Structures are given as structure tokens and as C-alpha cells.
Amino acid sequence: MTWVAWRQQRLQILLSLGIVAGLAALMTFVRFDAQSITDEQLLDDRYGTYINYLRLVLLALPVLLGMFAGAPLFGREIEHGTHVFGLTQSIGRTRWWATKIVVAGLPVVTGMTLLGLLNAWSSVPLQAVMFGGRLVTPTFEIQGLALGAYTALAFTLSATFGLLARNTLAAMVITVIAYVPAIAVVGNALRPAYATPITSTSDELPAGAWIVESSYVDAAGNPVSFSPAGCDTTITECMRAQGVVREVGFQPDERFWSFQVIEAGLFVALAALVVGVGAWALHNRLRLA
Amino acid sequence: MTTIALDATALTLRYRRGWGLRDCTFQLPAGRISALIGPNGAGKSTLMRLATGLMRPTSGEIRVLGQVPGKHGANRQLAFLGQDKPLYKGFTVEEMLRAGAKLNPGWDDQYAHRLVREADVPFDAKVGTLSGGQRTRVALAVAMGRRPELLMLDEPLADLDPVARQEVMQAVLAEVAETGMTVLLSSHVIADLDGVCDHLLLLSGGQVQLQGDVEDLLTQHRVLVGSRELVLPDGVVEARTTGRQATVLARTSNAPGWDNNEPSLEELALAYLRSAKKVTA
């Protein structure tokens, strides 16, 4: 079955890996070029646009490649009726399904994971000219382990919905509808709380700190309400006059990799759940004819 | 080797609207060529798909060579060729045979290649570029390369021109004669199956109308022609009158006063199908 699945999917697999390889070559070049530039302004001039476009591309790529590999995997096969061929041979339903998932999904998820790790390495010299730190959206999403984990979710979503909806296009639409909110909710609601934020009233925060909460406190540390609207002087003076200081909670840059592991684990778990739903449906719900 | 190839007991499949099959009980003897006849929507494809395990019955049971098709998929000794001859369009004929080899432990590569060669289909042609007849021959080669005990063909001749129909039928029959495999062949064109099949399963409205050995069925029935005033014998399946004359198909060996004739397979099948239609209508 492995050969059959490979023969069926090889065009998609090779195209996807080609895109990944092209980006990898670009990132490798950027790393070596950028680390030779010491002048920050020059670095910004040369790589400002690159950073913007790379963000766009790498935000879209997991869902695009995931769907490209996943949606037709069962959707197109059922549309063409060829699943009847695969399922009436001497191999069982489970092996047919599992082999197709592994053969189509593994290369693209592995490729994207490696690309994410490469981008983390490639972005090191560009850190100085990036807005915010590595933990901030969209910098966090486009490097490290997250890229591969997002791809895994997009792939399993589209493969499973293709199987359930028996249609490639429907699988793509449902995947986008499910994937985008998942990324947004995790990034905004869950990621800030992966670890307890460090609180500080200092004006100077360590480089790359990601501010996740902010409030006003009095000298004793009790929360107070403060409105800059009632001030006649500058806000800083006004706050000092009222004995109010701004307290922020932040996630330091050194938590980047542990956050990446948590985020990737979360998405891999979601992907596993989706695969589980597919397996359950395959055995209990599906009339595959 | 079991003597019963397909054994259905109260086999029922309910679709969201209506019945696919309703309380079907029948047996298909091994080593025979059975015809599965019925109008469109009679449940022929449903029956085959239940036998392959692609679908599961709502109630009742079907045994394929003694085994219930389970979660592990189709019986290894069962080869099925679906109505639209599903093959991977982007594969070459050679690759399609290779797929057959990879997916089936008992694959006979020489035999499958021979069948394709006999059909004059080029091995390096893409499946998507083949004509209907060629595609059917390749699909048959992939099915028969498995050396199955039971071969199920769902409307194998639909969408073929008359010459291709004949060639495909001959290819099937030659291989069946050689290997002795059991065949179940469905069609809504009865003429295609006349003289080919020796066992009959007649479906209509999801129910079995008639089953048995073709020879036996033909000798048990009579087409009676005579005046409409004549007394009808027992076992009338269908009676039609035109003017003063009546044509009756009855399950009887002899009816005095009538002009007695053995029916053809087509006459027999049509009479049962028409009478089934009247009952349900």
C-alpha cells in the first residue's frame, strides 16, 4: 500500500517539498548574509521587506500545504470513486486509511518542522530589526516547532473532513473555518498563560520581553484605577503626583523554546484528536460506497 | 472451498430515504456464473457493496465464502469490479498492475500481464487515456490477477459498444472456464446474460423475486398462449391479454388447452419484473 499511496501522492509531495526546499535555501542565504552586516540601519534596509513577506508566506504556508496534501487525499479519491478499488483489495480499511495519511502527511509535516527550525536559526541576526520579540505574533508562529505542528493540524483536518464530506473543496473550506480560529484563539487566549508572567514596575524590561498584561498599582502594590484623562500635566508626572505606577506582566525571551514546545504539543494533540475522529468514523459511521 | 459463495439471510439495507435491500434471503452456489438481474435501482449495486464490506447492512447478514465481511475489509478471495471501473487515472497500465501486486498477497503477475496483452492494451498507456473497452479489460485483469474464488462484476458491460461487450464477455467466460471461479454478474440488459449464466438472482424493489438454476427455472415455467376464455392454471406469474388472446407466464409444467412453450430467460425475467412492479405500484 505504501507504494500505491506514494505513487498517488508523489506529485503533491514533491511540489510541497520543493517549495520548502526553496524557502530553506533562501533562509540559509539570509542567515549568512545578515550576520555579516553589523550596521542596523543597513540590515533594516536590506531585510525589512524580506521579513514582512516571509511572515506572510510562513503564516499561510502551513494551512496551504496541509490542505494541499490532506484535502484531496480522501476527498478526491471518493469523488473519483477510486476508493472502491483500494478498499476492495486484500488490505483492510484501516491499513488503506493509515498508510495514505502517513505517506501524504509525514513528508510535509517533517519538511515544515525542519523549515521552522531553520527559520529560528536564520532569524537570529535579524532579531535587532524585528518589531517586538520572538514571542510576539506573527514572529512566534513562523519559526521553531510551531510551523510543523500547525501543518499537522491543517493536514489532519483537511484529510479527515475530506473523508467525512467526500469532497475536496468542502474539506478545504471546513479546514480554513476550523484552522484560523484555532490559531487565533491559542495565540491570544492561551499562549500568554503558558507560564506565569513575571511582573515588573520597572521602565526597563529585558530585550524581547512580551508584555501580556498591564495595570496601575499604588506604592503598596494594590491595584488602583487611573485615568490619564484627568491629568493637566504629562502622564508620567501625573502618575507620580498620584503615587501610581504602571505594573506589567511579561514573558521573557528565554521562554521561547518552552513556549514552542507547549504550542507544538497543543497542536499535535489537536491533530491526534482529529485523526482519532477520522478513525472512529472510518469504522463506525462511514458508508464508503 | 465452500459450496455456497454468497449466503444472505434477511439482508436489509435502509437508506435515508427508502430501502436499498429489504429482507433478502438467497444463496449463490460456488463454481457457477450467476446473473444478478433487475431494473435500475433494484438493489444490485447495493447487494454487491454489502458483499464487499464497503457498506454494512442495517439488519440481516451476508456471508462471502462463509465469512461475514468485517472491519478488516473485503474477503481476500473476493474480487470486485465496480460499475464505473475505478482505476487510478494517472497510473499507467503497468503501474495499475503493480498496484494490484502490492495490494494482494496472492497476486499472479504473469497471468495479469497475459490478460492485458490479450486485450491489446499498451502497458505504458495512462489509464485515463484508455477507451471504455480497454479500461474494462485492464480492470478485469487487475481483478482476475488476484486469482479470486469469487468475482463480482457490477454492470461490467454498461457504457461499452456492442463489439466491446462481446469481447469483454468472451474474455470473462474464457477465464472462468479455465479457472472455475464463481462469478456474479449484474446487468439490467437481460440479453447480455442469456446463454452465459447458469444461475439467476432476480431483484426488484430491493427484494428477491426469483432465484435458482436457470435450466431448472426455465423447465419449471411455461409461456402459455391461447384464448382469454381458457381456465388459468395454478402458479400464474403474469397474464396479459391482447384482444381475444391471452399470454400467460406460469410456474407449471403443463396447462391443458393452452399452447405451451418453454420461456426464454428474457421472457421469464421480464414477466417476474413486470408482476413485481404491479404489486409495488
Image: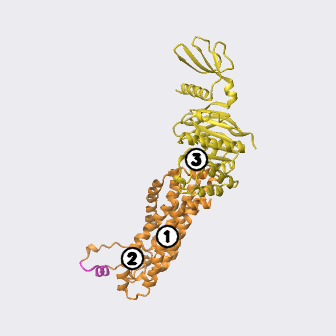
Chain colours: A orange, B yellow
Q: Decide: marks 2, 3 in contact (CB < 8 A)? A: no
For the N terminus of chain B, the image quarter is top right
Residue B265 colored in magenta in the image:
no
Q: Can you tell which quarter of the image residue B36 is in?
A: top right
Q: Amino acid at mark 3?
A: Thr
Q: Within 10 Å of the Cα at label 2, are there few (<14), some (14-19), or many (20+) other Cα atoms?
A: few
Q: Which residue is mark 2?
A: A50
Dot 1 corresponds to which residue?
A: A18
Q: What subunit carries mark 3?
A: B
Tell me if label 2 and label 1 are in contact, CB under 8 Å.
no
Q: Residue at x 54, y 46 (%)?
A: B132
Chain holding disc 2? A
- Residue type highlighted by circle 2: Tyr
Residue at image point 68% right, 34% down: B198
Tell me residue A183's x, y (percent).
45, 65
Give the SS element for disc 2: helix
- Main secondary structure along the magenta-highlighted residues: helix
Q: Is residue A2 left or right of residue A245?
A: right
- The verdict on a common chain for dots 2 and 1 is yes
In the image, residue B125 sits, relative to residue B261, either above or below, namely below
Q: Find residue A139 and report its horizontal and vertical position in percent.
A: 43, 74
